Image (tube, rainbow, N blue to C red):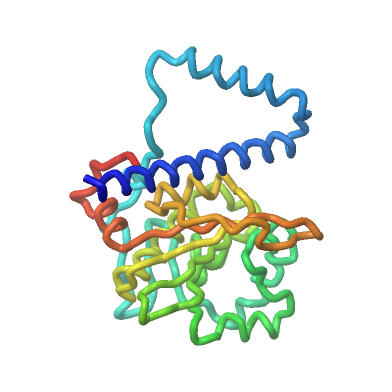
């Protein structure tokens, strides 16, 4: 009984922390859109109006992506060609000549500053970075064109875990579902080919879009590192989320596809 109560308390605390992060991220977005401080109360009032106007209760959780993907969505060609296909997106090992293209993508501050820590800006240093023995990176191909990268860092085979990073860098291709398919393909690689137990990610500050997207793959909040990095002389929080193989299999195996909510 006490053990169950402890779990309930821990779960409530984690939920409370997530709600605080949501509120902080929403506040920051309002400021970015030019909403004035004295108008925040008006926004809160409008949110309540929208809630009361609904004829039914809001959804209790975020839907998983298992309506889009299952394990069968991955065409596993690893043994023969060292590549994976998820519908129209293909993952192949990143080739060193392609690093020059990655450098171009990283020149945009909004892209470069999104990673924790940031990638090296020098091409020769970035080549060394990608060939480090504790890193594995793949090119993301859309219509047979290199459009991004996805990979793992801090690979720990003893603990069975790695940190995932992803970038769809080609202009005009964001929002087409390429990043989702690259993510699912890499999770398949980590869990089914490398047989790892845990994949985790770091997000700079509180990026609500990323939190929502990652939650739909089964990632859960592990913690927040307050004022952990400095960007343009401004300290920002770093959020960490994690996904475990048994959870991912439960969600995305065909038998788990009916479990649509967190």
Question: x and y percent of residue 107 in the render?
Answer: 74, 65
Could you tell whether 121 is left or right of 162 in the image?
right
In the rendered image, which quarter contains the C terminus?
Answer: top left
Question: x and y percent of residue 82 in the render?
Answer: 37, 78
Could you tell whether 71 is left or right of 109 in the image?
left
Q: Residue at horizontal 45%, vertical 61%?
A: 182
Q: Which sits in the foreground, 107 or 246?
A: 246
In this view, the residue farthest toward the left is: 255
Answer with the quarter of the image where residue 161 lies.
bottom left
In this view, the residue farthest toward the right is: 233
Above or below, comparing residue 58 to residue 107 in the picture:
above
Question: x and y percent of residue 81 in the render?
Answer: 36, 79
Count of numbered labels shown in the rendering: 0
Answer with the quarter of the image where residue 97 lies.
bottom right
Q: Residue at horizontal 50%, vertical 60%?
A: 142
In the rendered image, which quarter contains the N terminus?
Answer: top left
Q: Residue at horizontal 65%, vertical 59%?
A: 114
Above or below, comparing residue 50 to residue 262 in the picture:
above
Question: x and y percent of residue 13 in the render?
Answer: 44, 44
Q: Residue at horizontal 33%, vertical 69%?
A: 197
Q: Which sits in the foreground, 225 or 103?
A: 225
Answer with the quarter of the image where residue 129 lies.
bottom right
């Amino acid at each position: 009984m006490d053990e169950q109560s402890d779990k309930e308390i821990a779960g409530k605390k984690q939920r409370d922390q997530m709600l605080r992060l949501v509120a902080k991220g929403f506040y920051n977005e309002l400021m970015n859109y030019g909403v004035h401080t004295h108008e925040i109360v008006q926004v809160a009032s409008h949110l309540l109006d929208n809630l009361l106007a609904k004829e039914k209760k809001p959804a209790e959780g975020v839907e998983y992506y298992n309506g889009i993907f299952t394990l069968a969505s991955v065409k596993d060609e690893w043994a023969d060609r060292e590549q994976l296909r998820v519908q129209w997106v293909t993952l192949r090992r990143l080739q060193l000549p392609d690093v020059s293209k990655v450098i171009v993508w990283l020149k945009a501050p909004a892209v470069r500053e999104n990673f924790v820590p940031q990638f090296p800006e020098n091409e020769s240093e970035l080549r060394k970075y990608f060939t480090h023995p504790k890193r594995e990176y793949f090119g993301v191909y859309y219509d047979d064109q290199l459009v991004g990268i996805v990979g793992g860092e801090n690979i720990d085979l003893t603990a069975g875990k790695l940190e995932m990073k992803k970038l769809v860098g080609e202009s005009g291709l964001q929002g087409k579902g390429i990043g989702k398919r690259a993510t699912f393909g890499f999770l398949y690689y980590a869990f089914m080919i490398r047989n790892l137990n845990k994949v985790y990610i770091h997000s700079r500050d509180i990026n609500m879009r990323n939190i929502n997207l990652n939650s739909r793959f089964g990632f859960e909040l592990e913690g927040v590192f307050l004022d952990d990095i400095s960007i343009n002389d401004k300290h920002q929080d770093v959020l960490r989320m994690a996904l475990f193989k048994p959870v991912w299999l439960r969600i995305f195996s065909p038998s788990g596809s009916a479990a649509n909510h967190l």
